[in-house]
């Protein structure tokens, strides 16, 4: 075991994510706070746990147990940014840290132990560094293997726990199978009578592979104390920002764009020197009156120097917060990728490269939103399932298609969706208007479609109606309607909608 499991030191700061977001929101320490994602509690403070709030609990139940609970939407970026100064302080004294997640990091224990005299002295030093960096409630665990070391930093009340190599299996044995971090296995094993890691480790490896597959075999090895994963040292990021100061302040957009051109060239070259390309960048503008404007721009591939200059120009043209001359422009990488991920083929990108070049030139002449491309999104109505994105921007879908959309029509959608629904009349065989009551019952079978021009289309088949109730809690945007599908005598199918204003044709199935 000791030959394959390196001895690691793991630092864990309890409740880091919720503490970081609470401080960002200026919430006093000691208040009951919970982070919520998709309606479930993902983290909470000790004050919230004291009131009965637990991770995995529904938001409504958590608020019922703790009426004074402050609920925040989970934002992982806040925790990452807040943990960066702590990592920087640790790396100044002990280089070679591996960030596991915000609030948790690991390092090989051998170097710090030899430098400070022993493992316990190294643990005390680490705790002192993070305390000076503002991270309280920190613990340190040292054991053979990343799995055991991380559990040592979390289990018990000691600030530092050191598990000798020959005691790793005994340390893991009484812990519950939920410590493996696999919810499905943690639910299944207790039903089979296996409740602790020791009981799971005593199973034959061949039986575990036959029953749970390779994933189960990996967790079985962790339960036995066999974890060969190393703590790979991270490479501290180098600040690569383009900052341009204007003295006197620049009043015109073209003046600012010309002034930042050289800095943008240096910005892209500096990233390439690190074998990186920028896929998302942040542009900050500052005026001589102290007004600021900040925006993050995304790219489907990676930014060139000319495209960075274009984003500066477009942001200046679109901003409404700057009412004076610009004195500073800062361009910083928000997200980067290794350069090899975006390398072109041996003969370039072919037609895609020419299309991108041509549309980018058109966009430079007509403006950022002058060239739009459609992206599929989620929604209940066909018109909602299309989102227009400026050319060159990465699509950020506000309504994901994978989310459930109760009331949405099943596939296939209409092949033609009218940007403005077309008004018409739907009549029965006697020429009377067809209506739908509150229970969804049709007054009579639809027989004829009558357009505004007077054109009549005989119907041969129809289906529905399907009710649509949207945003009932907001009187300004609420919508109640009924939808039908109908086929006319020519074989053309229609999507018809009846709302408070009458009948409409929303689309056509060609």
Image (spheres, rainbow, N blue to C red):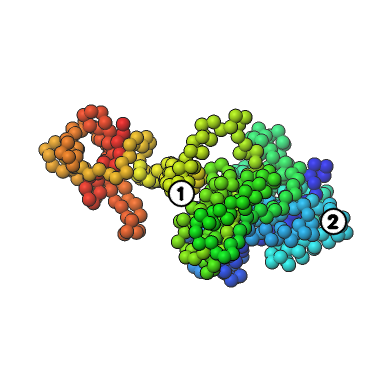
Q: Is residue 246 left or right of residue 437?
A: right
- Which element carries disc 1, helix, strand or loop? helix
Label 2 to label 1: alpha-carbon separation:
57 Å
Instruction: Examine the rendered structure and indicate whether residue 245 appears above or below residue 379.
Output: below
- Which element carries disc 2, helix, strand or loop? helix
Q: Is residue 75 visible?
A: no
Q: Dot 2: within a 10 Å radius of its alpha carbon, few (fewer than 14), some, or many (20 or more) residues? A: some
Identify the residue at horizontal 19%, vertical 37% (top origin). 449
Disc on the earlier residue, 2 or 1: 2
When asked about the image quadrant of residue 348, the answer is top right
Identify the residue at horizontal 58%, vertical 55% (top origin). 259
Which quadrant, please, contains the N terminus? top right
When asked about the image quadrant of residue 212, the answer is top right
Closer-to-camera residue (412/420)? 420
When asked about the image quadrant of residue 121, the answer is bottom right
Instruction: Examine the rendered structure and indicate whether residue 91 appears above or below residue 227.
Output: below
Closer-to-camera residue (131/334)? 334
Label count reads 2
Residue reaching furthest left? 430
Identify the residue at horizontal 60%, vertical 66% (top origin). 23
Closer-to-camera residue (157/192)? 157
Identify the residue at horizontal 70%, vertical 53% (top origin). 238
Q: Dot 1: within a 10 Å radius of its alpha carbon, few (fewer than 14), some, or many (20 or more) residues? A: many
Residue underneath mark 2:
113
Instruction: Examine the rendered structure and indicate whether residue 97 appears above or below residue 357.
Output: below
Percent from the top left, x then y, of residue 165? Answer: 82, 49
Residue underneath mark 1:
368
Percent from the top left, x then y, of residue 126? Answer: 77, 61
């Amino acid at each position: 075991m000791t030959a394959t499991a390196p001895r690691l030191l793991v630092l864990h700061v309890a409740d880091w994510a919720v503490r970081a977001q609470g401080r960002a929101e200026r919430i006093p320490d000691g208040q009951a706070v919970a982070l919520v994602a998709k309606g479930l509690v993902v983290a909470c403070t000790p004050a919230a746990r004291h009131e009965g709030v637990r991770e995995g609990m529904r938001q409504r139940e958590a608020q019922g147990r703790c009426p004074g609970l402050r609920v925040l939407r989970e934002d992982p970026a806040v925790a990452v940014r807040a943990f960066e100064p702590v990592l920087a302080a640790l790396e100044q004294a002990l280089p070679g840290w591996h960030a596991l997640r915000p609030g948790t990091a690991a390092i090989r224990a051998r170097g710090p132990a030899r430098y400070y005299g022993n493992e316990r002295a190294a643990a005390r030093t680490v705790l002192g560094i993070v305390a000076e960096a503002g991270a309280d409630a920190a613990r340190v665990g040292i054991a053979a293997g990343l799995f055991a070391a991380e559990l040592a930093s979390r289990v018990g009340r000691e600030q530092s726990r050191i598990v000798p190599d020959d005691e790793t299996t005994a340390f893991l044995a009484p812990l519950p199978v939920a410590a493996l971090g696999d919810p499905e296995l943690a639910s299944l094993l207790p039903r089979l009578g296996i409740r602790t890691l020791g009981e799971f480790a005593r199973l034959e490896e061949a039986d575990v592979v036959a029953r749970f597959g390779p994933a189960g075999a990996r967790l079985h090895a962790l339960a036995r104390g066999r974890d060969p994963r190393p703590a790979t040292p991270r490479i501290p990021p180098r600040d690569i920002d383009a900052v341009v100061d204007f003295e006197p302040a620049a009043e015109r957009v073209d003046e600012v764009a010309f002034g930042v051109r050289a800095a943008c060239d240096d910005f892209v070259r500096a990233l390439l020197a690190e074998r990186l390309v920028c896929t998302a960048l942040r542009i900050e503008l500052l005026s001589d009156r102290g007004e600021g404007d900040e925006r993050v721009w995304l790219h489907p591939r990676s930014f060139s120097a000319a495209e960075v200059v274009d984003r500066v120009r477009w942001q200046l043209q679109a901003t409404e917060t700057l009412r004076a001359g610009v004195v500073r422009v800062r361009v910083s990488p928000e997200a980067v990728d290794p350069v090899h991920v975006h390398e072109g083929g041996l003969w370039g990108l072919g037609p895609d490269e020419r299309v991108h070049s041509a549309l980018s030139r058109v966009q430079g002449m007509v403006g950022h939103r002058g060239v739009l491309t459609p992206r599929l999104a989620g929604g209940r109505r066909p018109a909602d399932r299309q989102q227009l994105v400026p050319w060159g921007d990465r699509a950020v879908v506000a309504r994901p298609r994978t989310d459930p959309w109760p009331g949405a029509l099943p596939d296939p959608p209409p092949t033609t969706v009218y940007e403005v629904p077309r008004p018409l009349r739907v009549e029965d065989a006697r020429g009377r208007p067809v209506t739908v009551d509150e229970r969804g019952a049709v007054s009579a079978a639809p027989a004829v479609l009558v357009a505004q021009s007077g054109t009549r289309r005989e119907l041969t088949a129809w289906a529905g109606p399907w009710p649509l109730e949207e945003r009932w809690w907001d009187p300004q945007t609420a919508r109640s309607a009924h939808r039908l599908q109908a086929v006319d005598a020519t074989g053309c199918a229609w999507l018809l909608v009846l709302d408070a204003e009458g009948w409409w044709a929303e689309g056509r199935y060609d």
